[in-house]
Image (spheres, rainbow, N blue to C red):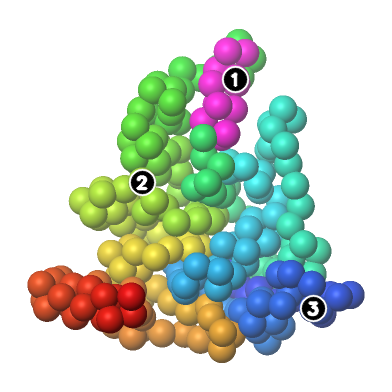
Amino acid sequence: MPFLRTITHETPEDPGAHPFDLPAVRALGDGLELHPKVTFLVGENGSGKSTVLEGIADKWGFSMQSGNRVGHPGLRQYETALAPTLRISRSPGIRPMDGFFLRAESFYNFATEMDELEEDPWTANGYFSYGGRSLHEQSHGEAFLSTFLNRFDGHGLFLLDEPEAALSPARQLTFLVRMHDLAKDFSQFIIATHSPIIMAYPEAYIYRLGPGGIDRLELRETDHYQITKRVLDAPERTLEQLLADDEEDD
Protein backbone atom coordinates (compact mmCIF):
# COMPACT_ATOMS: atom_id res chain seq x y z
CA MET A 1 0.00 0.00 0.00
CA PRO A 2 1.57 3.34 -1.04
CA PHE A 3 2.12 6.24 1.32
CA LEU A 4 1.08 8.67 -1.43
CA ARG A 5 -1.68 7.62 -3.81
CA THR A 6 -2.51 10.58 -6.04
CA ILE A 7 -1.41 14.16 -6.58
CA THR A 8 -3.79 16.88 -7.75
CA HIS A 9 -3.77 20.65 -7.60
CA GLU A 10 -6.34 23.39 -7.36
CA THR A 11 -6.51 26.34 -9.73
CA PRO A 12 -4.27 29.13 -8.39
CA GLU A 13 -5.23 32.78 -8.15
CA ASP A 14 -3.11 33.58 -11.20
CA PRO A 15 -3.17 30.58 -13.58
CA GLY A 16 -0.87 32.41 -16.00
CA ALA A 17 1.96 32.78 -13.49
CA HIS A 18 4.90 30.40 -13.49
CA PRO A 19 4.89 27.44 -12.90
CA PHE A 20 1.14 27.21 -13.52
CA ASP A 21 1.72 28.16 -17.14
CA LEU A 22 3.45 24.81 -17.72
CA PRO A 23 1.15 22.28 -19.46
CA ALA A 24 2.34 19.50 -17.14
CA VAL A 25 1.50 21.50 -14.03
CA ARG A 26 -1.95 22.35 -15.40
CA ALA A 27 -2.47 18.65 -16.13
CA LEU A 28 -2.08 17.87 -12.43
CA GLY A 29 -5.60 19.20 -12.03
CA ASP A 30 -6.81 15.92 -13.50
CA GLY A 31 -4.84 13.96 -10.90
CA LEU A 32 -1.65 11.92 -11.10
CA GLU A 33 -1.80 8.34 -9.83
CA LEU A 34 1.40 7.19 -8.15
CA HIS A 35 2.79 3.67 -8.27
CA PRO A 36 2.95 2.05 -4.83
CA LYS A 37 6.70 1.46 -5.32
CA VAL A 38 8.33 3.55 -8.07
CA THR A 39 7.06 6.45 -10.18
CA PHE A 40 9.26 8.21 -12.75
CA LEU A 41 8.79 11.76 -14.04
CA VAL A 42 10.58 12.25 -17.35
CA GLY A 43 10.71 14.91 -20.04
CA GLU A 44 12.87 17.56 -21.65
CA ASN A 45 14.58 20.31 -19.66
CA GLY A 46 11.97 22.87 -18.70
CA SER A 47 9.08 20.42 -18.93
CA GLY A 48 8.29 20.81 -15.23
CA LYS A 49 9.37 17.46 -13.78
CA SER A 50 11.67 18.99 -11.15
CA THR A 51 9.06 21.67 -10.43
CA VAL A 52 6.44 19.01 -9.74
CA LEU A 53 8.82 16.94 -7.63
CA GLU A 54 9.89 19.95 -5.58
CA GLY A 55 6.25 20.89 -5.06
CA ILE A 56 5.48 17.43 -3.70
CA ALA A 57 8.55 17.54 -1.46
CA ASP A 58 7.62 20.99 -0.15
CA LYS A 59 4.02 19.94 0.47
CA TRP A 60 5.22 16.89 2.40
CA GLY A 61 7.52 19.06 4.50
CA PHE A 62 10.95 18.01 3.27
CA SER A 63 13.86 20.43 3.44
CA MET A 64 14.24 22.06 0.04
CA GLN A 65 18.04 21.84 0.30
CA SER A 66 17.92 17.99 0.37
CA GLY A 67 17.40 15.84 3.42
CA ASN A 68 14.50 14.82 5.60
CA ARG A 69 11.65 16.72 7.21
CA VAL A 70 13.90 18.47 9.72
CA GLY A 71 15.62 21.38 8.04
CA HIS A 72 18.75 22.96 9.50
CA PRO A 73 17.99 26.54 10.65
CA GLY A 74 21.28 27.77 9.19
CA LEU A 75 20.30 26.86 5.66
CA ARG A 76 18.13 29.11 3.53
CA GLN A 77 14.73 27.52 3.09
CA TYR A 78 12.10 28.50 0.56
CA GLU A 79 8.58 27.59 -0.40
CA THR A 80 7.60 26.57 -3.88
CA ALA A 81 4.74 28.35 -5.61
CA LEU A 82 3.18 25.01 -6.48
CA ALA A 83 3.00 23.43 -3.02
CA PRO A 84 0.10 25.52 -1.61
CA THR A 85 -2.14 24.40 -4.48
CA LEU A 86 -1.25 20.69 -4.27
CA ARG A 87 -3.51 18.12 -2.71
CA ILE A 88 -1.97 14.77 -1.73
CA SER A 89 -4.10 11.67 -1.31
CA ARG A 90 -2.56 9.32 1.27
CA SER A 91 -3.32 5.76 2.22
CA PRO A 92 -5.23 5.82 5.52
CA GLY A 93 -3.55 4.63 8.67
CA ILE A 94 0.05 4.39 7.41
CA ARG A 95 2.92 6.84 7.46
CA PRO A 96 6.54 6.44 6.33
CA MET A 97 9.13 5.73 9.02
CA ASP A 98 11.90 7.27 6.92
CA GLY A 99 12.16 9.79 4.12
CA PHE A 100 14.52 11.89 2.05
CA PHE A 101 14.37 14.50 -0.68
CA LEU A 102 17.49 14.50 -2.85
CA ARG A 103 17.94 17.67 -4.86
CA ALA A 104 21.11 17.29 -6.93
CA GLU A 105 21.78 21.00 -7.39
CA SER A 106 21.77 21.74 -3.64
CA PHE A 107 23.42 18.52 -2.44
CA TYR A 108 26.64 20.44 -1.72
CA ASN A 109 24.77 22.59 0.81
CA PHE A 110 23.32 19.47 2.39
CA ALA A 111 26.81 17.95 2.73
CA THR A 112 27.97 21.13 4.45
CA GLU A 113 25.02 20.90 6.84
CA MET A 114 26.05 17.35 7.75
CA ASP A 115 29.57 18.57 8.57
CA GLU A 116 28.12 21.28 10.84
CA LEU A 117 25.95 18.74 12.65
CA GLU A 118 28.96 16.46 13.11
CA GLU A 119 30.81 19.24 14.96
CA ASP A 120 28.03 19.42 17.55
CA PRO A 121 28.38 16.70 20.24
CA TRP A 122 24.59 16.57 20.56
CA THR A 123 24.07 15.67 16.90
CA ALA A 124 27.32 13.94 15.90
CA ASN A 125 26.99 10.30 14.87
CA GLY A 126 30.33 9.58 13.24
CA TYR A 127 28.82 10.09 9.79
CA PHE A 128 27.21 6.68 10.34
CA SER A 129 24.43 7.38 7.85
CA TYR A 130 26.81 8.54 5.11
CA GLY A 131 29.51 5.90 4.83
CA GLY A 132 31.52 6.82 7.92
CA ARG A 133 33.10 10.05 6.64
CA SER A 134 32.22 13.52 5.46
CA LEU A 135 30.38 13.70 2.16
CA HIS A 136 32.83 16.44 1.19
CA GLU A 137 35.68 13.94 1.58
CA GLN A 138 34.11 11.70 -1.03
CA SER A 139 33.76 12.27 -4.74
CA HIS A 140 30.42 13.59 -5.92
CA GLY A 141 29.40 10.13 -7.11
CA GLU A 142 30.65 8.44 -3.94
CA ALA A 143 28.71 10.92 -1.81
CA PHE A 144 25.50 10.22 -3.73
CA LEU A 145 25.99 6.48 -3.53
CA SER A 146 26.92 6.61 0.18
CA THR A 147 23.66 8.41 0.84
CA PHE A 148 21.64 5.84 -1.09
CA LEU A 149 23.37 2.85 0.52
CA ASN A 150 23.67 4.07 4.11
CA ARG A 151 21.10 6.81 4.77
CA PHE A 152 18.00 5.32 3.11
CA ASP A 153 16.03 2.75 5.08
CA GLY A 154 12.88 0.67 4.73
CA HIS A 155 9.30 1.95 5.09
CA GLY A 156 10.46 5.24 3.59
CA LEU A 157 9.24 7.88 1.16
CA PHE A 158 12.04 9.02 -1.14
CA LEU A 159 11.79 11.87 -3.66
CA LEU A 160 14.85 12.06 -5.91
CA ASP A 161 15.68 14.71 -8.49
CA GLU A 162 18.07 13.26 -11.11
CA PRO A 163 19.88 10.76 -8.87
CA GLU A 164 21.97 9.73 -11.90
CA ALA A 165 23.64 13.17 -12.00
CA ALA A 166 26.90 11.91 -10.46
CA LEU A 167 26.64 8.18 -11.10
CA SER A 168 28.40 6.14 -13.77
CA PRO A 169 26.30 3.54 -15.61
CA ALA A 170 27.67 0.83 -13.30
CA ARG A 171 26.78 2.88 -10.22
CA GLN A 172 23.32 3.49 -11.60
CA LEU A 173 22.85 -0.27 -11.62
CA THR A 174 24.06 -0.36 -7.99
CA PHE A 175 21.48 2.30 -7.22
CA LEU A 176 18.76 0.18 -8.88
CA VAL A 177 19.65 -2.79 -6.68
CA ARG A 178 19.42 -0.62 -3.56
CA MET A 179 16.14 0.88 -4.70
CA HIS A 180 14.73 -2.59 -5.35
CA ASP A 181 15.71 -3.75 -1.85
CA LEU A 182 14.01 -0.72 -0.32
CA ALA A 183 10.91 -1.12 -2.49
CA LYS A 184 10.58 -4.69 -1.24
CA ASP A 185 10.86 -3.26 2.28
CA PHE A 186 7.72 -1.13 1.78
CA SER A 187 9.40 2.05 0.52
CA GLN A 188 7.99 4.34 -2.16
CA PHE A 189 10.00 6.38 -4.68
CA ILE A 190 9.11 9.32 -6.91
CA ILE A 191 12.03 10.11 -9.21
CA ALA A 192 12.66 12.79 -11.83
CA THR A 193 15.25 11.39 -14.22
CA HIS A 194 16.80 11.48 -17.69
CA SER A 195 18.44 8.07 -17.32
CA PRO A 196 17.01 5.20 -19.41
CA ILE A 197 18.99 2.83 -17.16
CA ILE A 198 17.19 3.97 -14.04
CA MET A 199 13.76 4.21 -15.66
CA ALA A 200 14.15 0.59 -16.81
CA TYR A 201 13.12 -0.52 -13.32
CA PRO A 202 10.34 -3.09 -13.92
CA GLU A 203 6.65 -2.30 -13.44
CA ALA A 204 7.26 1.33 -12.51
CA TYR A 205 4.98 4.09 -13.79
CA ILE A 206 6.72 6.39 -16.28
CA TYR A 207 5.05 9.76 -16.81
CA ARG A 208 6.25 12.05 -19.60
CA LEU A 209 5.80 15.73 -18.88
CA GLY A 210 5.76 18.01 -21.90
CA PRO A 211 3.83 20.45 -24.10
CA GLY A 212 0.90 18.04 -24.23
CA GLY A 213 0.65 17.81 -20.45
CA ILE A 214 1.30 14.44 -18.82
CA ASP A 215 1.01 11.03 -20.40
CA ARG A 216 2.07 7.58 -19.24
CA LEU A 217 4.54 5.63 -21.38
CA GLU A 218 6.41 2.37 -21.46
CA LEU A 219 10.22 2.50 -21.33
CA ARG A 220 10.71 1.83 -25.04
CA GLU A 221 8.31 4.63 -25.94
CA THR A 222 10.39 7.30 -24.22
CA ASP A 223 12.71 9.59 -26.17
CA HIS A 224 15.43 8.77 -23.64
CA TYR A 225 15.38 5.10 -24.58
CA GLN A 226 14.95 5.60 -28.32
CA ILE A 227 17.69 8.21 -28.69
CA THR A 228 20.14 6.27 -26.54
CA LYS A 229 19.43 3.05 -28.42
CA ARG A 230 19.82 4.75 -31.80
CA VAL A 231 23.21 6.17 -30.85
CA LEU A 232 24.50 2.95 -29.31
CA ASP A 233 23.25 0.76 -32.16
CA ALA A 234 24.95 2.88 -34.81
CA PRO A 235 27.14 5.59 -33.27
CA GLU A 236 29.12 6.38 -36.44
CA ARG A 237 26.08 6.64 -38.71
CA THR A 238 24.05 8.60 -36.16
CA LEU A 239 26.77 11.14 -35.47
CA GLU A 240 27.71 11.42 -39.13
CA GLN A 241 24.13 12.34 -39.95
CA LEU A 242 23.80 14.64 -36.94
CA LEU A 243 27.02 16.54 -37.61
CA ALA A 244 26.31 16.73 -41.33
CA ASP A 245 22.92 18.29 -40.59
CA ASP A 246 24.65 20.73 -38.24
CA GLU A 247 27.15 21.78 -40.94
CA GLU A 248 24.29 22.35 -43.40
CA ASP A 249 22.62 24.65 -40.87
CA ASP A 250 25.84 26.67 -40.65
Give the magenta part as a residue range. Answer: 109-120
Alpha carbon of mark 1 to alpha carbon of mark 3: how far? 41 Å
Figure check: 113 above or below 177: above
How far from the left and from the top, in percent, is residue 112?
55, 27
Density class for disc 3 (Cα within 10 Å; few <14, some 14-19, many ≥20) is: few
Q: What's the magenta bit mostly, secondary-structure-wise? A: helix
Q: Nearer the viewer, residue 240 or 234?
A: 240
Q: Report the disc number at residue 136.
A: none
> What residue does disc 2 label?
166
Q: Mark 2 or mark 1: which comes first in sequence?
A: 1
Label 3: state its secondary structure: loop
Foreground pick, 43 / 186 = 43
Three-letter code for the amino acid on which mark 3 is drawn: Gly
Rendering quarter of residue 92: bottom right
Q: Earlier in the sequence, mark 3 or mark 2?
A: 3
Q: Is residue 114 magenta?
A: yes
Tag 1 residue: 116
Front: mark 3 or 2:
3
Q: Quadrant of residue 226?
A: bottom left
Relative to 130, is 29 above or below? below
Can see residue 85? yes
Identify which residue is drawn at 63% across, 58% down: 54
Question: Where does label 3 land, which residue?
Answer: 16
Observer-nearest of 153 and 230 = 230
Position of residue 246 measured from the top left corner of the image (x, y, whole percent): 29, 76
Label 3 vs label 2: CA separation? 35 Å
- 72 to 25, vertically: above or below: above
Earlier-in-chain disc, 1 versus 3: 3
